[in-house]
Every structure is written in structure tokens, then in C-alpha cells.
Amino acid sequence: MATGPDRSNYLTTGRGVLSWLFTLDHKRIGVMYLVAITTSFFLGGVFALLVRTELLTPGQTIMTADAYNKMFTLHGAVMIFLFIIPGIPAALGNFVLPLMLGAKDVALPRLNLTSFWFWMIGAVFALVSIIVGAVDTGWTFYTPYSTTTGTAVISMTLGVFILGFSSIFTGLNFIVTIHKMRPEGMTWFRMPLFLWGLYSTAIIQVLATPVLGITLLLLVAERALGIGIFDPTLGGDPVLFQHFFWFYSHPAVYIMILPAMGVISELVSVFSGKHIFGYRFIAWSSIAIALLSFLVWGHHMFTSGQSGITNMIFSALTFSVAIPSAVKVFNWLATMYKGSIRLAAPMLYVLSFLFLFAIGGLTGLFLGALSTDIHLHDTYFVVAHFHYVMFGGTVIAFLGGLHYWWPKMFGRMYSERWAQLAALLVFVGFNLTFFTQFVMGSHGMPRRYYNYVEEFTTLHQASTVGSYVLALGFFIMAGYLLHSLVRGAPAPANPWGSATLEWETTSPPPAGNFDVELLAGDPYDLDALRYDPGVGGWVRKDPRSILVAAGGAG
Amino acid sequence: MNSTGLVQMLSVLAAGLPDDDGSSFWMPPQVSTVAQGVDWLFNFILAISVFFFLLIVVLMVIFVLRYRHREGESAEPSTSHNMALEVTWTAIPVVIVIVIFVFGFKGFLDMSTPPANAYEILVEGQKWSWTFTYPNGYVDSDLHVPVDRPVRLVMGSRDVIHSLYIPAFRVKMDVVPGRYSKAWFEATRPGEYDLFCAEYCGTSHSGMIAHVVVHPVGEFETWLEKASNFLDTMSPVDAGRKLFQVRGCQQCHSVDGSSKTGPTLLGVWGRPASFTDSSTTVVDENYIRQSILEPQARVVAGFEPVMPTYQGRLSDPEILAVIEYLKSLDAASSEE
């Protein structure tokens, strides 16, 4: 297979902005998504730093109460809807999924581009909302506050509505692609686990997102037309909104974490130099999480006044989700056992993930149990918990995946030394920012508070310092990744020794991905590879074993 | 060592020994009958969490050190699945979460079932203040309760969703417009504690704080009687000041000249005020009365029409007292 540096690839095939905006190439769409979501992450991060800075002192530090309320709302809305929901599936998933299948593209390339365009349109609505006065409802848009506040709620909710379509299209596309385009030899249980993650995510995207869309349309109808659905003064029921909202937004948590778990499954195997442990348990646990995720929304409402029996049922169902998550963690640990562990940057994120996700998952037990949740609900304990899952889980896995597939995406290696420093700063900064919030929360510090009682000052200040360390980590990361694009050493086809098919093409891949039709084997059979100092990367011991034309020697 | 002993040891390691008032590294003081039970479950889960967290992290570190990649070596051959092991580590968490669920549900039943003889106080939330109405009709902005007696709260909201949260009691319940929600507690130690709004409700959400005053045995009744007669025992100005403070006025109107959600009331008496419809009037008794009862009728220029009406919530003698208080603000400022 040709690996010459001057071979044309997907980045050089077609020039100019239009060749990107109207591309049907899943890799380019993935890269555009990557640029879009990292921009959103930066924006959401700036909002977060402003929030943390305001909380350096009780009372006013840098902004008014109204400005603060908008800042935390925008932080949440931008991070959730623009960054983390599309995050791994639309950016990494789009790039990797067809490559992992040995395919030329996703099944529905035009739908894929439409998804990106809908993301852009939704983002424009959100930006317009921010510019014309922002939103102060919290990202949850609880009624009747959201139907009575004077801020730009309609524009923001329409933005989220449109972003929902983007998410549905991506999910639909992935389901079709995985069903119809698996290569010869790839049975369901020979799929890379990242694809199981994307597949279970896609199920939730397709089934749950419409409910959010309907809910937000009802909200807009109430605000704009005065139709009473949620507002009690119009004959509506405000708690109904919470049921509708969480019917989507709790499964959405798993839209965020399932693909992250898929990334970790890939990384932990490759960097332990060992077959993944308990493949079937990991695969089934993804599906189990996806299905159970639809049945637990009521745990956001234990203090809402819903009946005791409802609380009991939702508490019990909530605990059931803990099981498949725990199973995955044990399987990842077992994969490391007797491995040959290389602490490259992606693996540092795996270790970081295991540490942080363990805390995020275990603190969920306090919130699933009814009597302790009554005390902890709507405090900083909850804020810390979901940041440990969303950031400690999803964002860390996203960063691990980004560092893992970066050479494939751009054909360049980044500085390992700087990458290790950034990973360390992110880990330390994150823990300082959010572990302090567990302690504040259990002591009764309510969330979304502009002002706070004096006893929390020290912990708030420690948390804010942590957020600056975290920001420094990301600043360094942006620096060495951008640097690698121009100065990075050329990446070999398979720099890590992975056995999945995306590493069988050049880095970066040509526009058509593969020159030949591939035959899939065990995606974790790392013994089939050997390090070749000549190319500086890994090659198959028997290159013919994965060629359909050769009849497959394996 | 038995398992209870292990749980205690782990939770002490993680949480530190509790202080005399029941507070610990993790928890505020325990001041209600349910607090101890909640904290016990918290510490139980904490012990389990610390155990599993250490298990995961210690194994991770050991594996990283023990199986670190060495040049020219690859992984030792080992099995890639083991049904017995995997079923075991699925089953153990199942048992643990069932136990936690049962304890949590039992605790919740205690917290949500008030005794029959509970003392009832009506609670109303509004942006951004609380009012507490006692059985004799007296209204206060702080929650006063007797020690060692069950108290039941019947709660409603005038605008958006609020949530009554008393960390020291481990009590939290949303206050939803259009329906009544209920909460109960029995305070176990006299003192003053924080009461927060826990459901985001707008600009001054974080200012929607009240105090819970737990009175020692026998002193609650005396307090209530004295407090209830304030219109008779206080001068109109003092009574007006009290009403101004406890009925939510001061959440939005300052008396020191600074603007909050509403205009300051310092030095407005007898002066002209201009309104959003460009009309003006001199602030007098009739204007103040209208502003209290029909706040949207004339809104001072530069402010939003957000004030709730006090129609039916303040009696005529009370409105008169407030008016006298506002006059006194003016007198005080003109003396300076």
C-alpha cells in the first residue's frame, strides 16, 4: 500500500471553503464538526470562567446578579447542546465510523451534511439569542420561569430544537450505516466497541430527541401564543414540563457518556497491548444502558412533589443503571491486567477517566437513594457529580480519542511531552474545581447562587483557582495541537499498534478511504501486528489476512 | 471485624469523626429527627464508595506499575473473558445497590410521613422572599418553630417554582404555583439556622434566604403572642418597618438610596415621581396605597412592572403603618 507523503489525501482533495462546506466526505464533515464543537467548547469555557470568577467573593465580584444568571445559563446551554451532545459522535464518530467499517463513507452522506448544516443553523439561533439579550432560565428552561422571564428564550429554544434535528440525523445515519455497511467478517460481535457505543447512542438520539423537540415547541407556543400547557395561571402544569424535559434530557446524559465509554474500550485495549476483556459484557452493557436510560428521568424530580410511589419506582430503576456502568469499569481494569501498558497521552486520559468516572459514578449512588437525595438535590453536590461524569467521563474520553485519532485525522504527531503536561494540568485543575463542590454541596450550598453565605468562601475560591489551572491545561493543549498541524512529525498509518480497520489506510486517509476491500477480523487481535522501525509504526504480520481479494488468510 | 464495624471504620476514615452537633467534614449540624438517619445512609454509601474507589484506583496503579511496557516485550498471554468472574462482578453491585435503595426508601418514608399532631404553618414563596403564616394569622419572614415538636409546612408559590431547603434539617421540598406541597420536620436543638431557596427563580434567587429560629421549650408560645400584637405594642413607624422587612418589600426596595429590582424608597415622600407612561405625581398616601394594591397601575420610569399585588395580603391598618414608616424615611433624610 502506498504511504508516500506526497500522495493526495482527503485534506488536499478539493480546495477552498466551498469544497468543505458542500463536501459529502464523512471525514471532512467530521473535521468541520470538530472545529465547530471545539469553538463551542471554548465559548462555553469562557462562560464557565466568568461564572467561577464571579464566585471568588460573596456578593458582587465582576458582574450583576442578572449577568451571572445569564452566564451560567449560557455555559450550560452551549456546553450541553452545542458541544457535548454532538461531541464524540458527530466529530470523532463521523470521522472514524466508516473507516472502522472499511467503508468509503456513511450510508447517507447527504443526510450527514444536512446534519452539519442544521447544527450551524441551530448555533446561529443560539448566538442570536445570546446577542439580543441572552437567556437566564438555566439550561433546563423550567416553567413557569422560562415562560415569564423577559429574556430571549424563544430564539434559544428554537436553536435547541434545530440542533435536535442535527442530532437525530447523525443517529439515524449511524444506525443505517452500522446495519448495512459492515464489511465481510464483521459480525455484530466482532464490531469495535466504539461502534457499539455509537450504535446505542444513536438509538437514544433517534428515540428521545423528538420528545425534546415537542416539549420546546410547546414552550414556545405558551410563550408566544399564550396557550396554557405549563403555566398554572393559564391552566397548565409546571411539573409536566419537568417530566417532558427529563424524558429527553436524562437519556441525553447517555448520549454523552456511551460514545465516551466506547472510546475508552478502544484505548484501554490498544495501550495495554492486549485484547479487550469481556467483549460481550461491554457490548451488552451499552445496549442495557441505552434502554434503561429511558426509565429513570423521574430521579431529577424527587423533591418536585411527585408521589412517594413514583419516587420509589424511579429510585429503584435508577440504581439499575449503575450495574452496566460498574461492569464496564471492571472490564477495563481487567484489560490492563497482565498487559504491556504504554503511558502515551491517550492512555493518560484513560487512567484519568477511570479515576474521575469512578467518582462520578459512585457519587450517583448518593443521589439515587431517596433520603440522601432530598438533602443533596439542587446543591453543588449535584453540580460536582454531573461534572465528574460529563467532564471527567465524556470530555476526558473525548480528549483521549482526539489524541488517539489525531494522527489519523491530520497525518501529524503532536508533542508527547506537552500532551502529558496538559493531561496532568487538566486532571489536577478539574479535581480542584469540582471536588471542593462536593463538600460545599453536602453542607447545603444550593446551585445557581450568585451570592453565598460566608462559610463557603474558601471552598469557592479553591474551586475558582482549580478552574484557572484547568483553563491553562486547555490553553497548552490548543497550542501543541495547532503546532502539530504545521510542524508535527508525519504520522505513520498505524502509530499505536491498533487492530481496527481505520489504521489500515494512510494517515491522513485518501478521499476514498481505502484502495481495497477489507476483511474484518477480531478488532482486538493485537498479536496480528508488529512494530516496524522502518515506517516508524505498526504493520500487519500478514498483510494479506485482511484482504477480501486474497481470500483472507486469517 | 464484622461488616458494620468495617463500614464505620471506612466512613470515619472518609468523613472524620462527627462533632457534638452532629456536623462532620461532609455534613452540616444535625438539627432534626431525620438528620441522623440521612447522615447514616450518607456515611454508609460513602464507605462503599471509598472502598470501590480505592479498589479501582489501587488496582489501576498496581497494573500500571507492574505491567508497564518494556522495550521488546509484549503482553503476557491471558484470557480475554471469564464468565464466572464477570457474573460475580455484575452480581455484587446488584446486591449493594438493592441494599442502598431499600435504606434510602425507608428513610424517605420517615421524612415524608408527618405525625398526626403536627403544628401547621403556611408557607408562601414569591420572588424573592418567604412568608410564614402561623395558625393565629400572624405573618413573619422568618420561620419560628418550637423545639421537639413536629411541624408541618403547607406551601404554595405566588409566581414561579421555588424550593424550601433547610440543610440543618435535611429537608427540601419544591414550592410549586397552582398546588400545595407539604413538608415536615421536628427540630431537636434550639438555635438559628439557614433556610435557602433551592430552585432557581431569577435575579435574587441567592438572596431568597430566611432564618429558621428554633425556640427552646415553652418560649415559642411567648414569642408568637408578643410578635402577633406588634400593631398594638409598637409605634406605627416601627410596625411599618417590621412589615416592610417581613412582608418582602425590602427584597426589591432599598431604604438607603440604592436601586434594586424596584426604586429606593428613601426620600421619595412628598416628592414628584415620574412613570413609564410619562405621567407624574407627587408621592402621597393615596399613591402609596395604590402602589401596594395595584402595583402595575403606575410603574416608576426605569423599572419593570414585576411587583406582585398585596391586595388581600395587607390589612388597612398595616398599609397605614407602612405609609407612616415611609414618611419617617423622608423625615430622617431631610433632618440630615
Image (cartoon, helix red, strand yellow):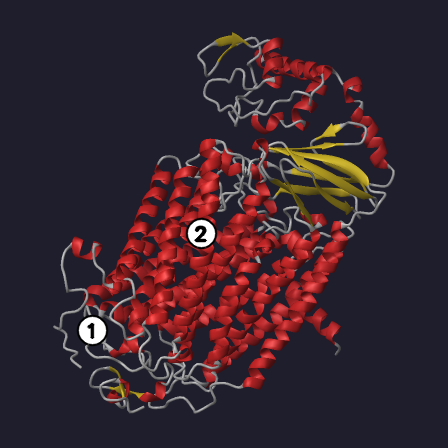
Three-letter amino acid code at disc 2? Pro
Please tell me which residue lies in front, A479 or A459.
A479
Expressed as whole percent of the image width and height from the top left, the position of residue A28 reads 24, 61
Q: Tell me where residue A38 sits by quadrant.
A: bottom left
Residue A543, above or below A230: below
Residue type at mark 1? Pro
Residue B251 lies, in percent from the top left, at 59, 29
Q: From the image, tell me which residue sits under label 2.
A: A210
Relative horizontal placement of residue B239, taking residue A517 as reference (left or right): right
Q: Position of residue A525 (x, y in %)?
A: 37, 85
Question: Where in the figure is residue A465, as x and y percent of width and height?
Answer: 46, 54
Q: Residue A490: which numbered mark, if any?
A: 1
Residue at point 34%, 82% (across, down): A185
Q: Check the picture and name the quadrant holding the C terminus of chain A.
A: bottom left
Which dot, 2 or 1, sits closer to the camera? Answer: 2
* Residue occupying the far front of the picture: A180
Frontmost residue, A247 versus B302: A247
Q: Is residue A265 visible?
A: yes
**Is disc 1 surrounded by few (<14), some (14 to 19) or many (20+) residues within 10 Å?**
some
Q: What is the distance, in whole Å, between disc 2 and disc 1 at their CAs?
A: 44 Å
State whether discs 2 and 1 lie on one chain: yes
User: Looking at the image, can residue A457 be seen?
Assistant: no
In the rendered structure, the answer to whether residue B170 lies left or right of residue A522 reads right
Residue at the right extreme? B218
Establish if B244 lies above or below A512: above
Q: Secondary structure at mark 2?
A: helix
First-in-chain label (2 vs 1): 2
